[in-house]
Amino acid sequence: VSSGINAEYGEFQTFQHYFKRINLSLGEDPSRMEWVADQLSNVPFFPYLDIPYCVLMAVFLRENKDSVKFAVNYPIASLVILVLYVQANVICVHILLGLPLVACLDGAYDTLSAVICWWLVFFCPGDLFFKAYQNIIPLQFVIRVVCEARHARLVMIACQEGHQYYPNHLTIIILCGLVDGCSGRLMMSLDRKIRGECAAENDGDFELKQVSEVTKASLVLAVFYSLIITGLAPISPNVGVLCGSLFMVALLLNNIILGRHDPFVPLQNVFWKVACSKHQKIE
């Protein structure tokens, strides 16, 4: 009996040992968290981040009304729109900072990825690629998660670029991150000008009139990153990007699992009631 008890006690100690190791790997050890953040920040954009984003944007265009008809009749216009969506962050931030727009073509792989993904989504023989994307739900989820991590990382890069030209100027740094994060939404206005009725129908009104969840989340990231860059928050930029990626993935899971489309609405309502005089909408 005593030998059985000792064996069970030994197994319990082994379980405790592995449980402690799991706790360390989950972030109790700051050096482990730094290592994970460094590894994620060193992942190259091409092909691991850029190609999933190009696929997601091409599918977004394909799912709009008469998108295939528009792509067949006006292939160059359809391709240019996809490239504008892919390069929207660089275009918007460079306009804000007064930098040359041609820099968006600096990465040849971005444009090449957009061309290949556009062909696969719209003109793949038998429409195999688009059908596979629609039928493989785990693939859709993985692509969405990768794109959210890319989003968080690009907002940090935009904040760092704003800090490079305007050191310690919080307003400009936050504005650069915000514009980078919501650049795809801002580009929808130009999309409507080009495609007309074929453009996205369910994307709300003009972004400045009807602020989307993406813009609100980008503002949160931009404020958080600006505090890190200016030294007001004792966190390294890589750890900040890791936290931002987890934040964006949490919002994605909130939308998918709980079906809530905008978790910022309750905070808006509280702020509106406390800090502002609430009036009824005037018809």
Image: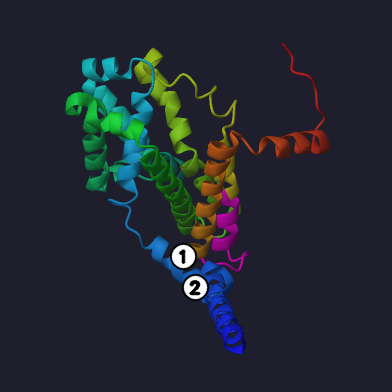
User: For residue 188, which quarter of the picture?
Assistant: top left
| Percent of width and height locating residue 146 | 40, 48
The residue nearer to you, when weighing 41 against 140, is 140
Mark 1 neighbour density, 10 Å: few (under 14) some (14–19) many (20 or more) = some
| Percent of width and height locating residue 229 | 54, 62
The residue nearer to you, when weighing 217 against 163, is 217
Residue position marked by numbered label 2 in the rendering? 32
The residue located at (27%, 44%) in the rendering is: 110
Please give left or right for residue 128 compared with residue 207 in the image: left
Bounds of the magenta span?
221-236
| Percent of width and height locating residue 93 | 44, 43
Give the spatial CA distance, label 2 vs label 1. 9 Å
**Image quarter hosting the N terminus:** bottom right
User: For residue 258, which quarter of the picture?
Assistant: top right
- Mark linked to residue 29: none
The residue nearer to you, when weighing 7 against 161, is 7
| Amino acid type, callout 2 | Arg
